[in-house]
């Protein structure tokens, strides 16, 4: 069923000029151009199936991730897909532990982003070969096979393979009912589209009004650049959404630890549910309330140190499904709700698979749980997310929802794409 | 004195085929080709001075770091050197906080290595303009100017600027005597050249015999791949060096936490002084005895958590002199001895400046302190280290000792250099 030798891996630098509209702006990233290193894997199986994968970037530097993907491709091209997925743990280890390449990581930054792009494409291809959406393939998979995809190196002191197996076996109980629940109701989402830092108050008001009409009840607000601005914006949003809807804050790593404590005190009266990334993402002991991490070792310590109250997985910063599985299982063991990071380019499309699987087969709970949603760039995907009543509806198409429209890739590839050629010719953007 | 606008920044991928002789091999890096992304900065000052900088890599992936250096060069070319060094903190922040590039770090992995290469070249150029070796420029510098080179973001909860100033001011006391001591005796070193993992027992014996004759008294042994091998090698080395010389072990991140504890118990009878990198470099709570970190935030937590007993700075993994200064000051405050990581390509040449400055102006002590030394590739540098009686003698030439011989760069640049062309033609190496 999963036949085929990998005959080619191509990677494209795709950039959307989002900085023109301040979409995605926050206290640390004032002018992001939402971008992706986009990978396509082909095989000789003759079934026409391709694996599509990506990792999310912010514009400049995407070419560096592209370069890293090319360096990793030697581990992929020429391999049988079946051999890879039958020893996915070994393959993951090979990719992340290359004796020469691991020096420039290990398992962090550029090389981990590139690893994610490559592995995301392999998971997409595997799910397509199984003719299932990725979440469903994971739900149906034997627990032992799921475990065989996870590298337990550096986390076995927090979660043993036996413990992980027990969690997955217990997760089988009531699975069918939870799957039906998802099919009917979807996974609860919150929106970050209303309150980017660079938006004017007028824009905030209009977007918030629209979102409330559409049924959104949970809103994330970017903060951290200027305290008086933050107070005004938080007050405005709290007054619009009322006392019963939820508001979350995200400082995007802007503060020092003491600064964070003082700043957050000033905003406490607006009743935020969490403060996201108050300080350096490396600062476990700085006690973030919620944190995006670059690998399972960092998440492990945040959990061990009880330094987070919500855990944010990311489909493109962690090492793909493989590493996300280990983090979902650790979160279950430590009883911390997972609220995935999404947005960017394709992060919503990808992470919905992981969190729906988590509900059906691991956590079994929606308490204190929701998945981030940002409403842009979905139009470039072949199988964009479907949001109904502020919930992610389970994808039905085979694969990992990673495939972009060919036309979009052509238009937005950097720097050759028509969009960029025009922007450069008109000097609208300095690149 | 430090006039000149930066007119160009070039970067070269330089690789030495060290894997052919298993030099540098350890439990995680079985076939490293010691390499560097090598940066040259030129100005319009007309004084003929150039800044040379590098970061150390292991072969494959150097091209990724080269790509990252190119991405950073936009922040450098066109700038006045004087403006940069007069607000070096601001410049450091600009380089590490680029709103688009920081996503692929931040301050870790490829982008941090590239940052180090660029900043190392700027420090080299600055010291050359001052006509002093870098360590001497730092020793002579006003404490306030030193502080103005450091970014305190994310570390101010562990070390305030006032505390750092006090440390530097106190360091002035007895400085002259310590400088004279260094000039006469140098900084104590230990050798890692005798016991790479891939060396045969015969090779170990010969190298150890030679080193003892040369006056070495401290030896590092690579371990972690196979317990029985480790026992045999440790026993051999301990029997050769006797009970009074020192032996250190380095597992290069090979173990899980529990595995490390068990393995180290088995080797304890050989009386190692420390166990280096027993597990993931990200695992603060995994309690390393000594650890190399990728930025000041990680070092801060290792110090706060009392998770290391020795601290290893690295001239090319941290963000150059700027970030190393912050770590040296934190180590002083937390009273942890610094024993720098060196070896590789040029790491000895660079880090000697930092540790000699540390002794003269910060720590004021040699107790439990020594700097790693590895005896290869020095012949490619214009101003190689001078080791006398197992000690680093303070460099006398202006700059940061970063300059490589032009002939070496030409011969070893990858893949165009003659050495690589021949290796590829003879199929001696797969690249």
Image (cartoon, coloured by chain):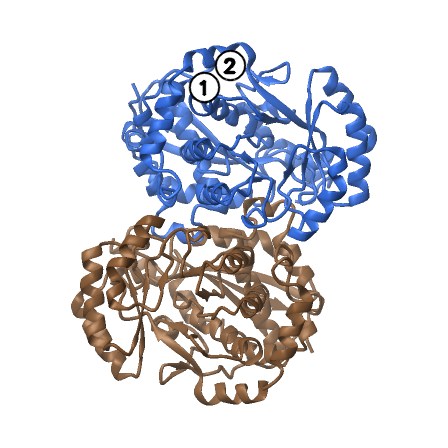
Chain colours: A brown, B blue
Splitting the image into 4 quarters, where does residue B56 fall? top right
Depth order, front residue of B59/A371: A371
**A138 horizontally vs B169: left or right:** right
**x and y percent of residue A98 in the render?**
64, 50
Q: Specify the quadrant of the image occupied by residue A173.
A: bottom right
Q: Residues within 10 Å of mark 1 (few under 14, many from 20)?
A: many
Residue A69 falls in image quadrant:
bottom right
Q: Are marks 1 and 2 on the same chain?
A: yes
Residue at image location 77% in from the left, 23% down from the top: B242
Percent x, y for residue B50?
41, 24
Residue B360 is marked as: 1
Badge 1 marks a residue whose secondary structure is helix
Which mark sits nearer the N-terminus, 1 or 2?
2
Q: Chain of mark 2?
A: B
On screen, residue B150 versus residue A67, left or right, reads: left
x and y, in percent, of residue B418 in the image: 63, 32
Residue A24's label in the rendered image is none
Q: Are marks 1 and 2 in contact (CB under 8 Å)?
A: yes
Q: Residues within 10 Å of mark 2 (few under 14, many from 20)?
A: many
Determine whether A149 is above or below B215 in the image: below
Left or right placement of residue A27 versus residue A65 in this view: left
Task: Give the residue pinned by disc 2.
Answer: B182
Please tell me which residue is depicted at 71% across the width and 43% down the height of the picture: B264
Q: Secondary structure at mark 2?
A: helix
């Amino acid at each position: 069923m999963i036949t085929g030798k990998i005959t080619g891996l191509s990677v494209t630098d795709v950039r959307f000029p989002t900085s023109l509209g301040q979409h995605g702006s926050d206290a640390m990233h004032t002018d992001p151009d939402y971008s992706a290193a986009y990978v396509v894997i082909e095989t000789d199986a003759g079934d026409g199936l391709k694996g599509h994968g990506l990792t999310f970037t912010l514009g400049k530097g995407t070419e560096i991730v592209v370069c890293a993907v090319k360096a990793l491709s030697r581990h992929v091209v020429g391999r049988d897909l079946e051999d890879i997925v039958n020893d996915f743990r070994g393959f993951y280890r090979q990719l992340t532990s290359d004796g020469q390449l691991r020096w420039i990581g290990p398992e962090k930054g550029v090389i981990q982003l590139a690893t994610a792009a490559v592995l995301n494409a392999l998971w997409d291809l595997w799910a397509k070969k199984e003719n299932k959406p990725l979440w469903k393939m994971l739900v149906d998979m034997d627990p032992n096979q799921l475990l065989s995809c996870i590298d337990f190196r550096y986390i076995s002191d927090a979660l043993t393979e036996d413990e992980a197996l027990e969690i997955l076996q217990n997760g089988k109980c009531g699975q069918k009912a939870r799957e039906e629940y998802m099919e009917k109701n979807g996974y609860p989402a919150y929106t970050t589209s209303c309150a980017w830092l660079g938006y004017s108050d007028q824009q905030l008001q209009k977007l918030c009004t629209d979102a409330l009409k559409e049924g959104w009840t949970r809103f994330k607000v970017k903060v951290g650049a200027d305290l008086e601005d933050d107070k005004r914006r938080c007050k405005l949003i709290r007054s619009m959404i009322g006392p019963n809807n939820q508001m979350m804050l995200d400082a995007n790593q802007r503060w020092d630890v003491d600064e964070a404590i003082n700043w957050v005190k000033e905003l406490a009266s607006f009743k935020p549910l969490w403060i996201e990334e108050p300080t350096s993402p490396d600062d476990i002991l700085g006690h973030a309330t919620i944190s995006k991490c670059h690998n399972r070792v960092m998440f492990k310590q945040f959990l061990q140190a009880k330094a987070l109250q919500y855990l944010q997985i990311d489909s493109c910063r962690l090492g793909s499904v493989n590493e996300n599985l280990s983090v979902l299982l650790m979160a279950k063991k430590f009883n911390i709700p997972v609220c995935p990071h999404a947005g960017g380019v394709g992060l919503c499309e990808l992470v919905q698979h992981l969190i729906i699987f988590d509900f059906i087969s691991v956590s079994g709970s929606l308490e204190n749980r929701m998945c981030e949603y940002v409403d842009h760039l979905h139009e470039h995907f072949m199988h964009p997310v479907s949001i109904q009543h502020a919930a992610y509806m389970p994808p039905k198409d085979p694969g990992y929802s990673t495939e972009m429209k060919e036309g979009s890739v052509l238009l937005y590839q950097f720097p050759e794409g028509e969009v960029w050629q025009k922007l450069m010719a008109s000097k609208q953007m300095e690149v």
